[in-house]
Amino acid sequence: MGWIIFIIGAIGWHIGLYGMFKKSGIDPVKAFIPFYNTWLIVEKCGISRLWFWLQLIPIAGQFITIWIIIIYTMHFGRFGVGDHAAAVFVPFIYLPYLGFSKDVRWGGDKVMKTYRKSAAREWIDAAVFAVVAATLIRTFIFEAYTIPTGSMERTLLINDFLFVNKLSYGPRLPQTPLSFPFVHNTLPAMPTTPSYLKWIQVPYTRLGGLGEIKRNDVVVFNFPAGDTIINLESFGSKNPYYDVLRKEFNGNRDQLMSQYGDHILVHPMDKTDNYIKRCVGVPGDDLQIKDGILYVNNEKAFVAPDSQIDYEVETNGTPFSQDFLENELGYKIISENGNVYEQNGDYNEIPQSNIVLLNLTPGKVDIVKKQPNVKSVKMFLNTQPDPMDIFPYDKYHAWSVDSFGPLHIPKKGETVALAQDNIDIYRRIITVYEHNTLEVSNGKYIINGKETPSYTFKYNYYWMMGDNRHRSQDSRFWGFVPETHVVGKASLIWFSYADGPRWNRFFRSIK
């Protein structure tokens, strides 16, 4: 639904520009060329070309584009707040009105000079309005998001630029409203300085949306284990605080604080880093991974056509050619000092053997199997229990990346009996996400000072996993995602680049 709304809006926006271009003496066909159309507006309105390039900056560029459109409408003699609001919030209606109404004419510099406010004052007013409007759009309607890692490849690629639809599940009121506009949790060029003030904190409130999170939606959410970070370059969400505490300090907070105490930063919930994964489990589901295959409610789960997982490929001793690896499998191969390797680690030879590890999509598996030098292809499995790394980090669950569960996904209003073998599964839900105190004493569970044998969940919870299954930090490592942390649905790739634009990914819906 989100991408359909966006496409309808985009069509109306471009049709409006077509009419406006014709009135202002620009070839109207060029209104349909993305980015070039705003370049022509910048030239026509006498705006510095620097502003065109600034609009390509992720997130902040939204403000610049809105400001350019407002300046353009002003050259049609439209100076009122209502006109600017219409240009921002319903451009697919307002811009066609300006473009095709007989009552609206192009005024150009003449109308800008004759208006009683100076042009500089109008530009400042437009900028202020654009900041407010862009902030509202970013908070309640949609937000731009850039893929930073390969955890969703090849469904999503590094440097895919997305629109995240916040209307799909309902926008949240900002928990931390006092913050620097157009950035998330740190100031530009100051990665150790928070971009927000915690003087005011608003309780979790979500406005009504167009629908609920569906199984297999691609979802952007606030990283649940990112509320506390070690604010150093090699830590943050890449090496979460709780992992460091558990694995390096054996749970001893005093020792961790003595070493990293000056660098500990506690984020409000809405200011933890944004993650993007596929929602493979919704409230009430039973989930299990057996031999690397995900099952939901005892049925094999959906496998995205561009998802990837590692395979162990046995050859007859003849290596794969670089041409095959690059042109058939899409790897970026680098040769150095006689060694051949893949830039992202998707191709690895096991020394002194005929075994090659390949990270493959389902379709690429079939291609590899048909190669004359291939003897066998089987999924590479990591079934070694790892209680220090795999949720819920206790002695009762010998789980691994490829052998996990069964696990029930909590649903709002459900009640679970508390026991030694499940308390660590629900501990963070009870204490952190639902803000209770919890004590365990002599096999008894004391919540908010009262002994209780069970717990009833206040929120819905979800299970998120990356499509690049062996290269994803996801719910297998840090557990459930509460509904409070959900930002929105990833709906559309609007731009993508790697050594230049990836044109075939422009305006692609996300599946």
Image (tube, rainbow, N blue to C red):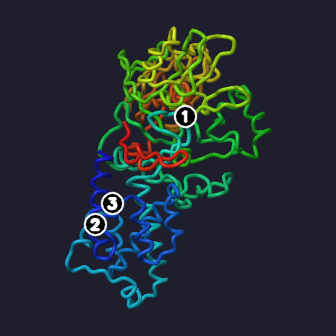
Relative depth, front residue between 124 and 396: 124
Determine the residue positioned at 46% across, 31% down.
464
Q: On the rendered structure, is 491 left or right of 48?
A: left
Q: Quadrant of the C terminus?
A: top left
Residue 431 badge: 1
Q: On the rendered structure, is 402 left or right of 114?
A: right
Earlier-in-chain disc, 2 versus 1: 2
Badge 3 crowding class, 10 Å Cα cut-off, few under 14, some 14 to 19, many 20 or more, is: some
Earlier-in-chain disc, 1 versus 3: 3
- Mark 3 against mark 2, which lies toward the viewer? 3
**Residue 198 x/y as whole percent:** 58, 55
Q: Which residue is mark 2?
A: 16
**Residue 242 x/y as whole percent:** 64, 33
Q: Which residue is mark 3?
A: 32
User: Is the C-beta separation of discs 2 and 1 under 8 Å?
Assistant: no
- Please name the amino acid that badge 3 sits on: Phe
**Residue 199 x/y as whole percent:** 58, 58
* Position of 120 relative to 14 (above/below): below
